[in-house]
Amino acid sequence: MATLPNPLPHLATDPSGRSLGLQLPLGRLIDATTGEVVLWHAEQQAAPGTWKALGRPAGRAGLLPVLVDLGGGQGGPEEWELVPAAMSYPGDHDADEVLAEYWAEVAAEEDGGWPGLAAGLTLTAAPDARATEVADALSEGVPGFKEPHLALVSARRSADLPAAVGWTGPANHEEDVARVCAVLRSWEDRFGIRVVALGFDRLYVSVAAPPADLAQARAITAEHFAFCPSSVLPDTDATLTAYAEDLVGNHTWSFWWD
C-alpha cells in the first residue's frame, strides 16, 4: 500500500498551516521515536466547537482530527512511545480473525467459542456529525480524560489513526495496533464509528449506529470483551449483561487497557 504524503512537516515552517488552507492556533509538532512527525496538537485545551472549526478544513488538507489527553499520569503525546514503523498495515488483517484470536485468549471461562461478528446496524446520525457531538462532550472533560487538546494526524481513515501515529496504548494486549485498527475499520463499516480521542492507554470512539435493544448489544459486547476485556469486566462485580445494557443507545464507546 502506497504511503500518503504527510502534510504535517509543512507546519514546521508554516505554523498556521496557511499553505494547507488552514488557520491553526499555536500548536506543537510531535515526533515518533524514529524522528518522523506524526502528530500536531493545539497548545490551548479544546472546547466545544473546536473540533468542528478545525476538523473539516483539516480533512481537505489530508489530515484527520483526534483529541489527545495532555493531563494523564503518563503525560501527553510528547512522552508517549509512538512507533509507527513497528506497526503493520490495518488492511492486511481480518477483523473477525483478530477478534476470534483475542476471544480465545481472554474468554476461556465463557460458554462456547467465538460467536462471530455482530450484524451491522442502522445509522441514527451521520458518522462525522456524531463524531463532532462526542468530541464536544469530551472537550468538556470526563473522568480518565482530563486535558483534551485537538490534534491532527495524516491518515487514510479515522480507524487508522492509532496505527498512523504508532500508538502503543494496548501494548499489554496487542503490540501491533494495526490489528486493533482492523477491528475499528470493521466498526466503521458496521456501526459508523469514528476514532475521537486517544489517551496514553485510552481510546474513545463515536457511534452513529448504536444497538437499539439488548439482543443487539449482547452481540456487540462479545466483540468489546475480546477487544478490551479490562474495560468490559474491570472488576469482579462487573457482568457482561450490565455492560450490554449500558451499550443500548450509547453514542460513545470507551476502552482502556491495563
Image (spheres, rainbow, N blue to C red):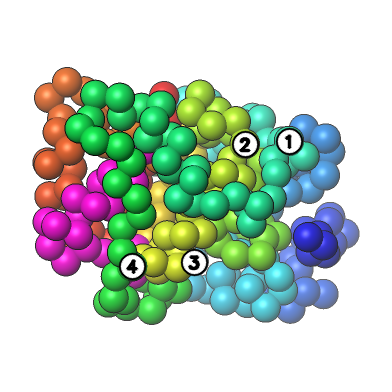
Residue extent of the magenta highlight: 207-226
Q: Which mark is residue 51?
A: 3
Q: Can you name the residue that lies furthest to the right here?
A: 13
Disc 2 to disc 1: CB gap under 8 Å: yes
Residue bearing mark 1: 86
In the picture, residue 49 is in which quadrant? bottom left
Looking at the rendered structure, the kind of residue marked 4 is: Gly
Residue bearing mark 4: 120
- 3D distance between C-alphas at marks 2 and 3: 28 Å
Q: Which mark is residue 176?
A: 2
Q: Earlier in the sequence, mark 2 or mark 1?
A: 1
- 3D distance between C-alphas at marks 3 and 1: 29 Å
Q: Earlier in the sequence, mark 3 or mark 1?
A: 3
Q: Earlier in the sequence, mark 2 or mark 3?
A: 3
- 3D distance between C-alphas at marks 2 and 1: 7 Å
- 3D distance between C-alphas at marks 4 and 1: 31 Å
Q: Quick one: label 4, few (<14), some, or many (20+) residues within 10 Å?
A: some
Does the image show residue 44? no
Residue plotted at (31% across, 76% down): 123
Looking at the rendered structure, the kind of residue marked 1 is: Ala
**Above or below, 246 relative to 8:** above
Residue plotted at (64% across, 56% down): 91
